[in-house]
Image: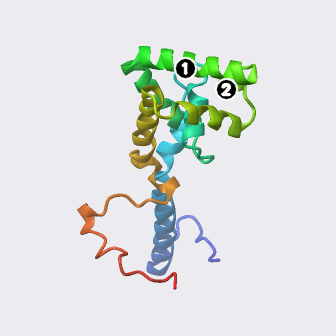
Amino acid sequence: MHDSPPLGASLSRRRFISLSGQSLLVLGATAVTSQLIPVTLLANEALPDLPAGLLCMGRDIYPHDRLGDMHYATPLAELVGKQPKLIKDGLKALQARARERHGKAFEAIASEDDRVALLREIETGPFFREVRSALMFGLYDNTALFPLFGYEGSSVEKGGYLARGFNDIDWL
């Protein structure tokens, strides 16, 4: 490493370029990590008030361990606001099935396989379809989450995939 010049000494051209290069590296690293800031900030916010079992249901429909609860809770809270009766009635029926088969609330069932089996029984109904749809758009159309899924986003605005990766065969 270079020694720092003493206080009051003039800054040489070589030292200036050296410091500038280090600054650019820091700026580049900051720019890359700043793309993930919305993901981190959302994870630290307070979760919206959701009916019991709805968040668990959402995580079972689209399981992603890397996503915080907030990413599921936000679209689900919007759905509750838009269709409160459908959500209330659907959850009531789901909880009744869970208690009938397992003796406990849906979210209290420890086995994911058992919860998924209950969801498969209702997957053709309007309640399940609305929850699935809200989460599908809430998770996979959220540009802040694209990096977590390994998706670079739409390429149309950047000239399409023919110019961006279509012919990349580095995997061969």
What residue does disc 2 label? 107
Residue at left offset 54%, top offset 34%: 58
Q: Which mark is residue 118?
A: none
Label 2 SS: helix
Residue at left offset 60%, top offset 48%: 66
Residue at left offset 39%, top offset 48%: 143
Label 1 SS: helix
Q: Where is residue 67 in the image (x, y as percent from the top left)?
A: 57, 44
Res. 91 image quadrant = top right
Question: Which of 87 and 98 lies nearest the eye of the viewer?
Answer: 98
Q: Where is residue 160 in the image (x, y as percent from the top left)?
A: 27, 68
Residue 97 appears left or right of 125: right
Q: How crowded is mark 2: few (under 14 residues within 10 Å), some or many (20 or more)?
A: some
Amino acid type, label 1: Leu
Q: Is residue 74 above or below residue 94?
A: below
Q: Is residue 16 visible?
A: yes
What residue does disc 1 label? 91
